[in-house]
Amino acid sequence: MAFNRPLLRTSYAEDAAILPTAFQKGAVGIALLLLSAMALDVPIVSAIPKFLLGNTWLSPFNNMLIFCVAALGINILVGVTGQVSLGHSFFMGVGAYAAVLLGGDGSGGLACVPFHAQLGLLERTTRCGLALPIWIWLPAAGLAAAAVGILVSPVAVRVRGLYLAIVTVGLVFIGQHIGVMLPEFAGDAESGRRWPPLEFRLWRRNDGNEDNPLINFSEDGTWFGFLELSDSQKSFFFLLGVVLFATVLAKNLMRSRTGRALQAIRDRDVAAEVMGVPEREYKRLGFAISSAYAGVGGALFAVNLSRVGPPEWSLLLAVDFIAILLIGGAGTIAGTLMGTFFVELLPDFVERLTESQSEAAEGSGVGGAIARFLLTDGSRNDFGPIATSAQAFGWPLPVPLWNFVIYGVLIVVFLIAEPLGLFGIWLRIRNYWKGWPFSY
Amino acid sequence: MLFFAQATALATFTGAITRAIALGCIYAVVALGFVIVFKATQVLNFAHGGIAMAGALFMSIMVNDAGFPFLPFGNPFVNGEDRPGVMVWILLLAIAMAITAGLAMVLERVAIRPMVGQPLFSLAIITLGIEVAISAFNRDAVNTPNARSLEFPWGTNFWEILGANVNHSYLVAVLAAAFSFGVVFFFYRSRLGVAMRAVAFDQEAAMAQGINVGRVFQIAWAIGGALACLGAVVYSMAPFGPQGAVSSDLHPVLAFRALPVIILGGLDSVTGALIGGLVIGSAEVLAGQYLSGYTSFLGVGYQAIVPYVIMLGVLLVRPYGLFGTPEIRRV
């Protein structure tokens, strides 16, 4: 029976399944296969046009996977609970610092007592770090960020709407300054300090097993005896695992009692309270969970860059996440992942497109003419919008700045035209084909 | 000896308090732009900073560059070595404010008008998108080999009052604030201003009374843009951070510095913007002056986050600011 009517659900469990339809199961499977094929450099994927050159995409993809973790967090806060926060980068920073305190190299012990330097106990150049392994610092990054989230929640649950957005902007600036205040935690005020490498050990780095971590994600090597992998391929599979875990966790949260309470608060907080949902407790919980995701994402972000200064945890990073959420579709897991994919890979795509265009500009024909129109080195007055030389000031913008313009404009366009984001576009396509050839 | 020490303390205080009032007035001007736009259109304009910096850049182009971008003719106001005189400079400032107002009106028409009636959150995020896009252009335009100087006619001149150096810029900042609050005060009593207040009170009812709500929106954004330009230009004056030129790291965060001001005063209160600006500006300058002995503990540049700390404190006690209207929630 169920075979003839695939959308007929006969139990609540079926209705609340993570992937309810065969199509969704297939789509997720194919996506994972394609991602793995891309990472392993299987020829099918590398055969795509020149500017998509296979394996060079690994590092942007790793970055994208890390952003996925943090974006799932902001989806829980903004998309599910409906609390607009511009302070996600602050919580990412908290997680990253927790990670470097526990996992980074340093003198340990006394160096981890803040403000000792003012008391003249140690040189300010000392770094605090306990060199603990990843299975301690990664969860601890999440826990520390969640704890800070609970710490600021007395203010955050009292204010609502736009006031909350402004408060969280304040948090970002305060956080950046705390990074400057505590050089033994954060390192140099500009360039920061070194984060621990991505590797799996059973215990501390300096405890005799100096050179052989169980799994080293930051060096080339062989897995299972036959799989030759580079460092970024290894990191890719590790991060993919983390993202899968985080996604399942977020999905399960959304279909649990807690998730339903959070959604009730988003839809109408007073009504939720009337129905017996303790508003403030659940808002605080939403803050804590979202911050935990941010913390884990921030720790991985810093580890991936290996050196991060306090200015990195900026408002712009937080706006990135708002863009991800709006372009992908707020409140949905699939939308969040699509949004991250789109927003985080778009800059690299544009950059590579420009590179291929500057090659095409040398050639003749229509392609060459288009490329010559688009690009300018600022020397001739040809109104080309994309500057290829750093000497061009004013009008022709260089590619990185065009990326900001593009995603600023995308935020505006999506909010005006498709508030549900990419997920909304997908819904329209799906609904069209569901009833095809009838209109509904 | 004792007398000398007292005189120095007095001089320090005079210098600090005049600077505090001046910075407070600048913040008040920037915050006033936020408040006018929010009152009339219910939009928290995160793009205010981008518009403000664009305004300062327009001004800089007019007083500095030999030609205008995209225009075939040269710049008649720049002739060789001389700085523009005060009257010419003020005229140029008025033109820059008008151009910025035009920019704000275009942005309102293109991005905000289609969203009328949407939740406040969506509108605020739209302005965030505009901010990201505008700042990209700003960052490119400020990035010239020479500093983007604004050629203030009074430069770094100062009077000596009670042993302290009081810059002419301080007086200019106070005059700018007096001008903008005065204009807004009289504007709210004009026919159009009454219409704007009616729209702020209830858009639909105002429309039913025959008020052209779209036009009111446009004018509110134009005033906001002009005030943003004025605030950013005045903020660039010499004793303050940017030291007489458009700065690539201070100007982009100017509007975010003004956020604590409107939180303190309330998003929809003109008086609040003035009082909040003075309080926040004073707190920042006085903390910078009198806590500087603890810099090794507080970290370099701690005064910049004093406003945010005050903001968190105020919100803990009064979630709608000191003069803001509490939101009425319907079930």
Image (spheres, coloured by chain):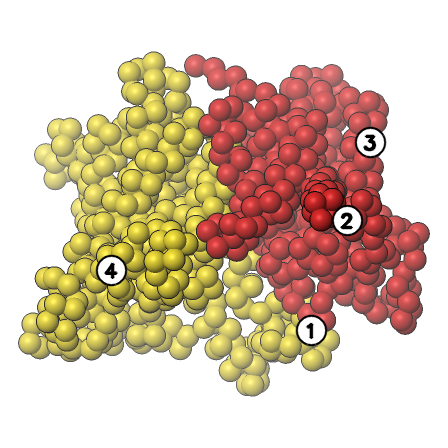
Chain colours: A yellow, B red
Amino acid type at mark 3 = Gly
Mark earlier in primary sequence (2, 3): 2
Where is residue A342, by image quadrant?
A: bottom left
Amino acid type at mark 4 = Gly
- Between marks 2 and 3, how big is the CA–CA gap? 29 Å
The chain containing the residue under callout 2 comes to B
- Between marks 1 and 4, how big is the CA–CA gap? 45 Å
Q: Nearer the viewer, mark 1 or mark 4?
A: 4
Q: Which residue is mark 4?
A: A108
Q: Which residue is mark 2?
A: B164
- Callout 1 crowding tier (Cα within 10 Å): few <14, some 14–19, many ≥20: few
Amino acid type at mark 1 = Pro
Q: Are marks 1 and 2 on the same chain?
A: yes
In the picture, the quarter occupied by the N terminus of chain A is: top left
Identify the residue shown where x is 23% and y is 72%. A218
The chain containing the residue under callout 4 comes to A
